[in-house]
Amino acid sequence: MSNREPWQRGDDDEGDEEVDESNYKTQKDAVLIAVEVSESMLTPPPASSSKKADRDTPLAAALKCAYHLMQQRIISNPKDMMGVLLFGTEKSKYQDDDADRSVPVYPHCYLFTDLDIPAAEDVKALQLLAEDGEDEDNVLVPSKEPVSMANVLFCANQIFTTKAANFGSRRLFIITDNDDPHEADKQAKSAAAVRAKDLYDLGVVIELFPLSRGDEQFDMAKFYDDIVYRDATVEADMTEVLTSKSGTGLSLLNSLIANINSKQTAKRALFSGVPFEIAPGLTISVKGYNVIHRQKEERSCYIWIDGEIPQLAVGETTKVSEDTARTVEKGETKKAYKFGGEYVYFTPEEQKSLKDFGPPCIRIIGFKPRSSLPIWASVKRASFIFPSEEHFVGSTRVFTALWKKLIKDDKIGIAWAITRSNAKPALFAIIPSRDRADEESATPFLPAGLWLYPLPFADDLRNPPDLREPIQASDELVEKVKVITENLWLPNRMYDASRYPNPQLQWHYKILQALALQEEVPEQAEDLTIPKYKSIGKRVGGHIRDWEGLVEEEVAHVKKVSAGKRDAADDDDDDEKPKKRVKTESKAAGSGSQLSDPQLKAASESGTLAKMTVAVLKDVLAVRGLPVQGKKAELLERLDEWVDKNV
Amino acid sequence: MAEKEAIVFIVDLSSTMTNCNSGRTESDLDWSMKFVWDKISHIVSLSRKGLCVAVLGLRTDETNNSMGEDPGYEHISVLQEMGPMDMGALRNLQEKIKPSEETMGDAVSAVALAVQMITDYTKKLKYNRQIYLVTDGLGPIDIDDSDLRDISAQLNGNGISLTVLGVDFDDPEYGVKEEDKPRLKTRNEQVLRKLVDQCSNGTFGTIAEAIDELDIPIVKPPRPYKSYDGQLSLGDPDIFPAAIVISVERYFKTHAAAPPPASTVIVKSDSALGESEAAESEVMEGVEFAAVKQARTYKVNDPTAPGGKKDVEFESLAKGYEYGRTAVHISEAEHNITKLETTKEFSILGFMEQKKYSPLLNLGEVNVTYAKQFDMKSQVGLSSLIQGMHRAGAYAIARLVAKDGKEPVLVLLAPDIERSCLYDIPLPFAEDIRSYQFPPLDRVVTVSGATLTEHRFLPGKELEQAMSDYVDAMDLSGYAEDEDKNLVDYMAIDEPFNPLIHRIKGAVKERAIHPTGPVPPIPEILIKFSHPPEDVVEAAQSQIDTLIQAAEVKKVPPKAKGRRQRETVKPLSGLDIDALLAAPAGQPSSKASAAITPQNAVPEYRRALSSATDLPQVESATKQMGAIIRDIVTSSFGGNADDRALEHMGAMREELINFEEPGLYNSFVADLKKRLLSGELGGDRREMWWRVRKARLGLIDGKESEVSEVTDEEAKEFYTSR
């Protein structure tokens, strides 16, 4: 990140780290996907002549889905773990039993990818199995005798206990089409229920992704209702278990991916148990979530390449004093602000008190119509808040009443909030989002609730540059653009973020994957953000030609009128003809910011740039977004370079 | 380029200024100096060479000025000659601002002297020239109308602004009127007011108002920054000949301001003070602190090395990225290989309906785009686009690459027909939206899939009505009238200041002037919007009361959380697992003595405690658990099982708090600490102890469990002591 722009500096992500409620646990997520291997999972769907028909066996769909999830999580959760466990297999394999014979083997459980942050080889192995159907080791052969679900669950238990100890979130995803694995064996069924309770006590959440066999319903009551738990403290959070099936235009794979995607990232709260003061004397509590968050590629790191395999070098920082290069202990340091060329110093307690504006709280100070919020009043993404009954009984109904009222009357709340202890205080608009099912919802991809939308402070507003009043277009021209606009509506006349993956992010990881696996680096990136030029041309090309003609006409007309005016008034203030200004350069030099590009070019070519004063040069540079530091010679060089490149 | 400035402060130092007046507890001098110090320290904080300050003392014991010989200029001293201000100069000045024994000295002469100082210094160059006169108006002023005219002519002729600030000067507008004002002061006030009135750029006021206004933060927006300069297009002329191409320039509209950063420093060691001062004195004069640098060392895993890690040389490292846990290094020649190749562009993808847009999609700072200056074609073009979009009720979605090679972003383009510009707002990509699931708010879906419309989570009619009335009563639009009698909202968009930024700036300034003084309180203006306006609340009180009643919100008592008997958790089917466990007939009470296995310790321990009926059972289970934890720690190689140990400790701590037996945990952890630090558990385990501290798994104090005998301090002490 050597060439960061000046405006990118700073701690834009400060306060974005997420917290977990139980503080002794690490804020990491581990997902183990358990996929059942059985005859029925290996049965291809009935042959169909339709092009879109499913060809994947349920098992293939499940593995592809696991592969898809693994790839996604490398991008979205690079520090989180994932594993793939196949059960019901003829073969059995547990963690790499490097001579340690005490490691138990769970019959018919095959740990295909051990629970860990996936390595490139893991991705490759899963890809070969899932996408290319290469199964050299015959791991996808179903066992002849039924697998004990108790064993599967205990195997998962051991994997989590050893590999993801103390993780804040541990989840077991079970993908199966068998709703009754122990039909006749009551004892096996009970044993499984006990092992499921173990997992619950360990804090492992079981998420079931049932696949329907043809038209048969997956009946939870037969077995899995004894296995799956819902958190008792969040009674309101009763999300249904969705069965994946093919049909209605959706392949089994897509249906499964859709269901798993909604659980892709562990739901982590940004803040929790924060008092939400709806009115003086009326407080409820809410949790906050980062539902929208700019995903960026992981920062570059240092890698040690002298060893057998390249290894990440972990940096350790020690603080040393600048004057003596002596190592500094933590207790010795003080916080200081630069002031007039010196340090002004505060004790650590004082420094903390500077940032102390009281305990966390979200306090409504009043309400305004939604229309009072200008579209440009934005500085940072909004966070989602949702009620929690943990601290105040009745929070949910009060929250809902407020949510309903704000939607009904198109109002927003104004709130002062400190969302975590020592967080910067800020002002927010409280904006409701509609239910996904609501037809008027502009954001069907976002949950329904209230949002804390940060408002800019006076300090955050920038003044526009001094510009002259521009020439306005005629009504005819405006009408033309209206027609063009109406011919270029996006699907559903709305912005659907899911249609636009981040091209830079995707490219970054695609290249890394290729490099890691020593595969060929792809040539061309897929970039869905590039406008469909051809289609634009086809749809509105004719109108645009008309538009171009009209613009020419209007410009000619305005020129004629203003030329007439000028003659009459003998006004030589000729801003439309920048060429003439070159001659009057010395006059213009007083306000370098108004020097136009052609003028600059002329000056650069004639060598008169050097005659400008440093102040003017800096002005000229600043207006073009160039750095203004340095001696005059450097400034000149920088400007010359810019002119060469840009004008 | 910021403008150069030359400012003279004239400060009345007479003995009369030592009085405390109008019920104030500080002297007039200390009080007035608040204003002067604030101004001067602000100047210091800017560290600008072109910002020059001179200070004149009025009614000083001595006479020390260039016209001291002339009658009328006695008892005026130059405390600081015109020049840039730094901390050194500030300290210097602080020593000189002391009340004198003197009462004589002519304020208007001082102004004349100040004019001369400014004109001598600034010559005819471009400067912003100002004089501040701070006085209690109790010194004799010997002047006639023609003198006044001369001086004001000089001020006006040199473009100097004059601000007279008087202690308890009458100001009906601000609401200050001094009773029993001495005759002399009344006359002086008149004279000074006359002088100010004759100035084309003069201000006359009472100092109380000036001091009040010091709390109003100064926000100086940086110059406009051009973030894009090029074409805005619809279509691509290279691909399809007909395309709209408009030359535009784009600037920041909002940009989050950051508080001043604090540096980490240490007090300079004595030896360093002597040696390095010569070298550093240029950069920072009189520094007692030395900056702290970060030194980085790098380690890699090496199973053969002690502790499993070894240091590596920085030179042996290559830059790279992580793909999952695979380290991918990238050679110097290919360092840009993961960067998408892009060319500068600002191109519209299509349009969306304005009413189908939600501000929740805004990802951050907004920019504003104008047509290029002096380019008629582009101006007409952009104007037609702005108005056409407005007429169609449309926003545009555009792809923006601000510079060649920069990553593309998608932005929303919103037209503003009044200002003839387009605002652009960054939008999220597919990866930026996390699909967290939340239950619906307006209905409750039960496990069986039934939908309820009446439930304790759902508001009843009464609550909905009360909320509606309350929201309407607390409406802030049309709160006040502006100068033109138009109704304006409470908290206009440009009204609130960033509290943290100005809080820190204020405190730093105060500390610079008074290094030993306390941190000042937060100025009221910074937290003005932290509570609803009082008058609005007062008017809405009955609606508030009704709402509170209808809401029936009850605080969960903190105790209940801990003491609550753990509800028997059941799977969706409601199956009683504990009963199932007890089922194996023939051995009914086996669970009490059930051994806890290391493989499945956490669930088994939890179960043992939830079914325990007497203390010995708990003690026995806890003892077993403790042994398992010690085993894990002992077998931990290079800390690889530390997390496991922490998890077990966490579970044990949690269960014993729930069971109200904190003492059992406390004695366990005290013992563990001893063993960790003594090396009894397989060598040096300080790292593990440090992690126990970090995870806050120490003693359970009275706050966490009422029955604990450990005090808050003891629990804290436990973490710190060795």
Image: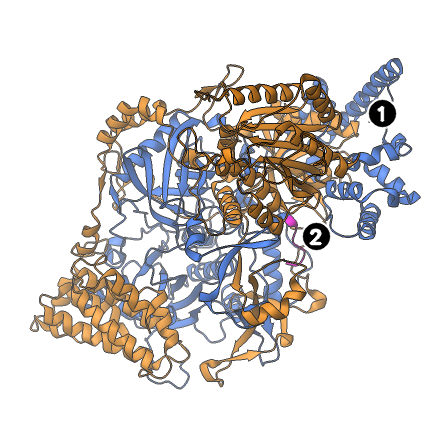
Asked whether residue A546 is drawn in magenta, I would say no
Q: Is residue A629 left or right of residue B670?
A: right
SS class, disc 1: loop
Q: Nearer the viewer, mark 1 or mark 2?
A: 1
The residue identified by callout 2 is B405
Q: Colour of chain A?
A: blue
Query: What's drawn in magenta, residue-wise?
Result: A1-6
Dot 1 amino acid type: Asp
Give the camera-side residue of A133 and B448.
Answer: B448
Q: Residue A605, can we see it?
A: yes
Q: Quadrant of residue B282?
A: bottom right
Q: Quadrant of residue B695?
A: bottom left
Parent chain of label 1: A
Dot 2 amino acid type: Gly
The residue identified by callout 1 is A574
In the rendered view of the protein, which quadrant contains the C terminus of chain A?
Answer: top right
Q: Colour of chain B?
A: orange
Q: Residue furthest top?
A: A568
